[in-house]
Amino acid sequence: MAITQNQPVIRTSGLSKTYPTGVAAVDSLDLEVHAGEIFGLLGPNGAGKTTTVGMLTTRVIPTSGHAWVSEVDVVAHPTATKRVIGVVSQTNTLDRSLTVWENLYHHGRYFGMSTKASRSRADELLAIFRLADRAEADVSTLSGGMAQRLMVARSIVHHPSILFLDEPTSGLDPQSRLALWEILAEIHASGQTILLTTHYMEEADSLCSRVAIMDHGRLLALDEPDALKKTVGADTIMRLRTDGDPGALRALVEGVPGVASASVLEGEVMVATRQADGLLPRLIQLAEGNGFPVRDVSVDEPTLETVFITLTGKELRE
């Protein structure tokens, strides 16, 4: 059956994984990912993102619940599942005994593609992923960014319905990260469904049409990035660091007109407001006048990290 836009291509119902140590890595996850979207699982290390991807790609067996990928029951039919998915893990899994081109060619042959089709597909993907000039190179000579691009290219050789990317830009320099973002946007424009995990809020905000925020194995929020940011209830976030007691400063500023909410996070007072004009000087004056010397300030728009802080009371990055 053909899958149309906005039809779920990934579904989970009560999907859970508890390891023998008793750690509940994923707890009753209910999720739908639509055809043709880039869907992000956002959360800190240990949130359950990698375990979720592991269950959806047959590498991790769920403790309970159900999951379907392209209408295939992942647990009941793992071989059929592998035929319709592409996977890029956090670990470099390139075959070091093969050249860059051969890594692509043999992957196609492994999935039953003809010699001619595999050759053509390898050439096509080398061009798309800006690796044509490295076709005959030993993969051990590739930079981190090039190796990551090759792994993504290899994962889509067999035209999978869904591409799973687990922390695809972790460890990459900013230039390599942006280059991969551009390529992912290009293959997504061709209709590729992508599910990625990340702890980079900018990555989720830039690439994803919808984002699920996870922590401690649970789903905390799910929506479009802009809609999630609106849940903060503010258009400006101010942070003040003081030598004094930040809890006492929070109590002092939260009653100021224009302050929607105030909280303490890692020694800083985070102030959310909808009326930022002239507020920061007033807050500084109020703080200093009451014995709270302000050592540092910052002003930003709400981000996905702000949403995470609002939901959990802690930073997204660890």
Image: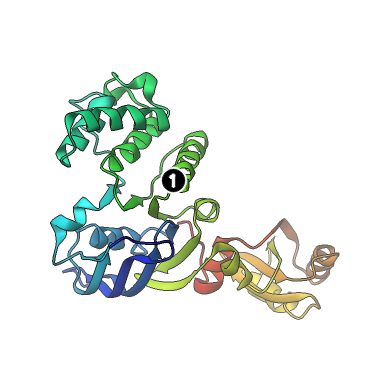
Across the whole image, how many numbered discs are drawn on residues? 1
Q: Where is residue 100 in the image (x, y as percent from the top left)?
A: 28, 26
Residue on which disc 1 sits: 190
Which is nearer the eye, 188 or 88?
A: 188
**Quadrant in the rendering for residue 217:** bottom left
Q: Where is residue 185 in the image (x, y as percent from the top left)?
A: 48, 45
Which is nearer the eye, 72 or 98?
A: 72
Does residue 288 sit above or below 258 in this rendering? above
Residue at point 80% right, 63% down? 280
Q: Quadrant of the image for the C terminus?
A: bottom left
What's the residue type where badge 1 is placed?
Ser
Residue at point 41% right, 67% down? 214
**Quadrant in the rendering for residue 19:** bottom left
Task: Answer yes or no: is residue 42 visible.
Answer: no
Identify the element where label 1 is drawn. loop
Does residue 286 sit above or below 191 in this rendering? below
Which is nearer the eye, 34 or 251?
A: 34
Residue at point 37% right, 64% down? 47
Q: Quadrant of the image for the N terminus?
A: bottom left
Side of 203 relative to 194 (left or right): right
Side of 280 relative to 153 (left or right): right
Dot 1 surroundings within 10 Å: few (below 14), some, or many (20 or more)?
A: few
Q: Where is residue 299 in the image (x, y as percent from the top left)?
A: 72, 58
Which is nearer the eye, 150 or 60?
A: 150
Does residue 301 sit above or below 223 in this rendering? above
Side of 5 relative to 265 (left or right): left
Q: Return the residue found at the far bottom.
A: 255
